[in-house]
Image (cartoon, rainbow, N blue to C red):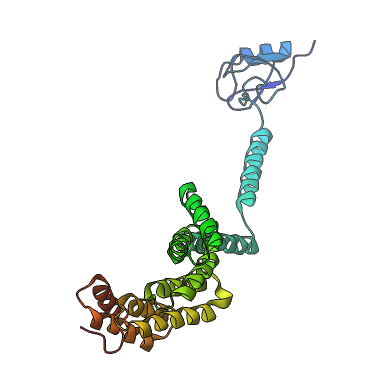
């Protein structure tokens, strides 16, 4: 029977079935010949049995002696292909880079805008959601209302009712109209009472601060009532001081300065006199005291 032809595992020289050593390099070759005869051999790396014509071990992938190099070259080629594929997958077109940069800039801009945006100052309208006055106050208001309805000339009950309605309007501005009407009924009986007239003027002023559509006319009515009080009593300091306040809010700076000075002239040492001086200094009126 013919002996299978094998090559030396070290140098690749052809071996015959009778060779025990490679005639070219002297390497012992019995294992190669036995493998050729049996049609199989063992991997030098892991010891797994391999076919005689196998170039690589099926178990560990090691190259077998005498194997040719196409598998290794193919492996190198595959590795190179993988690297090129990875490199290509990580590369970006110029338009992609530009678009990504623009997106990042926009995100950064909006984030900066949100962080630095100045929050608006909260200035809720006066009693936009009014709370009711306490029950005891409303009970007394109801009692006084019944009293003046029963006796329209009861000036003491009228002025007390007007003042209580004015106080309750701090909780519910809807009561300002009732307060003004009650002050009017009282002043019809006592027209020379400057306190009641100034208080009614303050009610008009407070309504003007709420009713923006009629602010100018309501401020004008407030000024009219307070000036009337000063005509009745030129030394009425609350009338002078409140005229300064209303004119200041109306934008009448010269008139406001005049009335604050008037309040100081009446009594500079009083609480209102000192407050009038502070207002003059705070708003830097022309000719205000230093």
Give the total of numbered labels: 0
The quadrant in which the N terminus is found is top right
Residue beneath the point at 55% across and 60% down? 150
| Residue 252 image-quadrant placement | bottom left
Residue beneath the point at 52% across and 81% down? 216
Asked if one can make out residue 183 in the rendered structure from this viewpoint, the answer is yes
Residue 172 in the image, given as x and y percentages of width and height: 52, 59
Asked if one can make out residue 250 in the rendered structure from this viewpoint, the answer is no
Residue beneath the point at 51% across and 57% down? 147
Near-viewer residue (10 or 25): 10
Residue 68 in the image, given as x and y percentages of width and height: 67, 31
Residue 92 in the image, given as x and y percentages of width and height: 62, 57
Near-viewer residue (183 or 97): 183
Residue 131 in the image, given as x and y percentages of width and height: 51, 53
Q: Residue furthest right?
A: 1
Residue beneath the point at 33% across and 82% down? 233
Near-viewer residue (163 or 248): 163
The quadrant in which the C terminus is found is bottom left
* 278 over 70 or under it: above or below: below
Near-viewer residue (278 or 150): 150
- Image-based side of 41 in relation to 27, left or right: right
């Amino acid at each position: 029977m013919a002996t299978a032809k094998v090559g030396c595992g070290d140098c690749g020289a052809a071996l015959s079935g009778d060779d025990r050593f490679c005639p070219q390099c002297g390497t012992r070759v019995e294992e190669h010949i036995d493998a050729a005869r049996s049609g199989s051999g063992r991997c030098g790396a892991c010891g797994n049995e391999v076919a005689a014509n196998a170039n690589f071990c099926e178990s560990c992938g090691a190259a077998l002696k005498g194997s040719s190099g196409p598998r290794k070259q193919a492996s190198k080629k595959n590795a190179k292909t993988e690297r090129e594929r990875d490199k290509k997958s990580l590369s970006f077109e110029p338009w992609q880079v530009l678009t990504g940069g623009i997106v990042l800039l926009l995100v950064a801009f909006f984030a900066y805008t949100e962080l630095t945006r100045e929050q608006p100052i909260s200035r809720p309208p006066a009693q936009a959601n009014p709370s009711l006055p306490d029950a005891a106050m409303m009970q007394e208001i109801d009692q006084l209302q019944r009293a003046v309805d029963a006796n329209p000339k009861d000036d003491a009950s009228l002025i007390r009712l007007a003042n209580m309605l004015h106080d309750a309007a701090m909780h519910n501005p809807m009561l300002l109209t009732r307060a003004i009407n009650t002050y009017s009924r009282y002043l019809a009986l006592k027209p020379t009472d400057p306190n009641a007239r100034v208080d009614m003027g303050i009610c008009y002023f407070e309504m003007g601060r709420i009713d923006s559509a009629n602010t100018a006319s309501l401020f004008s009515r407030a000024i009219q009532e307070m000036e009337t009080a000063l005509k009745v009593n030129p030394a009425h300091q609350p009338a002078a001081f409140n005229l300064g306040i209303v004119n200041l809010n109306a934008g009448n700076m010269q008139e406001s300065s005049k009335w604050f000075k008037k309040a100081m002239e009446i009594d500079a040492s009083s609480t209102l006199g000192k407050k009038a001086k502070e207002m003059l200094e705070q708003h830097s009126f022309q000719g205000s005291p230093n």
